[in-house]
Amino acid sequence: MGEVQGQGYIGQALGVADVLAASFFHALDYRADDPEWEGRDRFLLSIGHYAIALYAALMEAGILPEDELVTYGMDDSRLPMSGMASYTPGMEITGGSLGHGLGIAVGMALGLKRKKNPAFVYNLMSDGELGEGSTWEAVMSGVQHGLDNLICLVDFNNQQADGPTRDALATGKEEAKWAAFGWHAERVDGNDMAAVVEALDAARGTDHPGPRVVIFDTRMCKGVDFLETREITHFVRVEPDEWSKALAVLDAGMPQ
Ligand SMILES: Cc1ncc(C[n+]2csc(CCOP(=O)(O)OP(=O)(O)O)c2C)c(N)n1
Ligand SMILES: [Mg+2]
């Protein structure tokens, strides 16, 4: 998908790939042939610009056809650069106005509870969104309503558009802060598959009477060494000859 455009949010996609793989192929309950199934766990992409990553997961899950991926970012494509709920099966919300996904997730989780629907709501958000006031309103609302069916996943890559998150607005002690608000909070290496799976299980399985969060420390451009070392990775430009090099590096790192 990135190669079609020559650029894109591939740094985020590579960093969060392990979290998405564990979510879609371990944690979430859904039906690939019926993405609107009422009993499905909802997976909200608060960070609309990460759509490229979710499209890959939806394709692997059998919700999107593989041959459509080449239309990514083109006019009339169902796969715009920023996720749009009305365009794409499996895209639950139109995210991208950062700081709003968690509030929507709170509303959905509350609605499901009232309807006695046992499904869970997962909200994938970024470290940059921790600097939005609306996020912390939602954090409090989730506790107020005792939403034990709400799981927030924070992709903490410590990067924002202009550089490191800690230089823009350092939240600090993130896990302790969520816990102080009343959330079950864990923090793990988001590129360690065993740790990711364990944390997702704990978030869902705990008997904590309120919402749960897992903060995943991830690495932008994970798996492609010559991209990982770039300083600004928010919107990566990859030269034509580098795509095959990047794919070869990724394939070499894949477990057989
Ligand atoms: C409310 C809002 N403000 C600003 C933007 C512009 N914007 C798009 S992505 C981004 C970076 C936010 O940080 P994070 O999501 O952590 O970035 P990444 O890790 O993808 O670099 C910004 C500021 C936006 N989409 N929404
Ligand atoms: Mg970030």
Image (cartoon, rainbow, N blue to C red):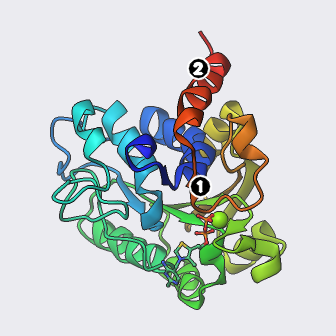
- Residue beneath the point at 69% across and 74% down: 162
- In this figure, which residue is indicated by the disc labeled 2? 251
- Residue beneath the point at 67% across and 58% down: 233
List x then y, in percent, for residue 77.
20, 54
Q: Quadrant of the C terminus?
A: top right
List x then y, in percent, for residue 226.
74, 39
- In this figure, which residue is indicated by the disc labeled 1? 236
Q: Is residue 67 above or below residue 168?
A: above
Q: Quadrant of ligand 2?
A: bottom right
Task: Check disc 2: other Cα within 10 Å, few if <14, some if 14-19, many if 20+.
Answer: few
First reached walking from the N terminus: tag 1 or tag 2: 1
**Mark 1 vs mark 2: in front:** 1
Task: Check disc 1: other Cα within 10 Å, few if <14, some if 14-19, many if 20+.
Answer: some
Q: The disc labelled 1 sits on which kind of residue? A: Val
Q: Residue furthest top?
A: 256
Of 188 and 125, which appears nearest the observer?
125
Q: Is residue 136 above or below residue 108?
A: below
